[in-house]
């Protein structure tokens, strides 16, 4: 059960040709090549992004705090009181 002999590879190739057909194999190889090129370019771009110095990147604007919110306490009597102004939704 060692490495595959050339006869084994020939049988595997024959089965692949029978399953997929001789017309679809070149298209599949072309699509695989395109996918690998895209993958390679994306990996290279990711490496370039990591290699950029931190000083070259623009710093984020400073974070400002929102003004404090005033809390109002409403009594149960005020909640049930009719409103003098109509509400608009």
Image: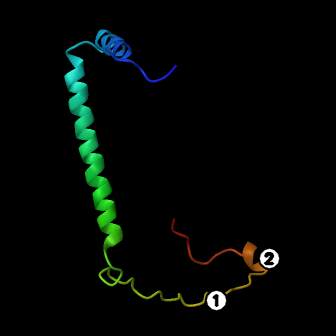
**Residue with the most extreme top position:** 18
Q: Which mark is residue 76?
A: 2
Instruction: In this rendered view, identify the residue nearer to me: 29 or 78.
Output: 29
Residue 77 drawn above or below residue 26? below
The location of residue 3, given as percent across then percent down, is 44, 24
Instruction: In this rendered view, identify the residue nearer to me: 64 or 78.
Output: 64
Label 2, secondary structure: give it. Answer: helix
Instruction: In this rendered view, identify the residue nearer to me: 15 or 53.
Output: 15
Label 1, secondary structure: give it. Answer: loop
Q: Residue at x 28, y 50 (%)?
A: 40
Instruction: In this rendered view, identify the residue nearer to me: 8 or 46.
Output: 8
Q: Are marks 1 and 2 in contact (CB under 8 Å)?
A: no
Residue 77 drawn above or below residue 15? below
**Residue with the most extreme right position:** 76
Counting every numbered tag in the picture gives 2
34 displayed left or right of 66: left
The location of residue 12, given as percent across then percent down, is 36, 15
Quadrant of residue 14 within the rendered picture: top left
Per the image, the residue denoted by label 1 is 70
Q: Which mark is residue 20?
A: none
């Amino acid at each position: 059960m060692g490495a595959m002999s050339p006869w084994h590879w020939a049988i595997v190739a024959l089965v692949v040709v029978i399953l997929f057909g001789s017309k679809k194999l070149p298209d599949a190889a072309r699509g695989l090549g395109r996918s690998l090129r895209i993958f390679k370019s994306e990996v290279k771009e990711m490496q370039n992004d990591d290699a950029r110095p931190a000083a070259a990147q623009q710093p984020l604007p400073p974070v400002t705090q929102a003004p404090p919110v005033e809390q109002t306490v409403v009594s149960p009597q005020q909640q049930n009181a009719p409103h003098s102004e109509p509400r608009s939704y």
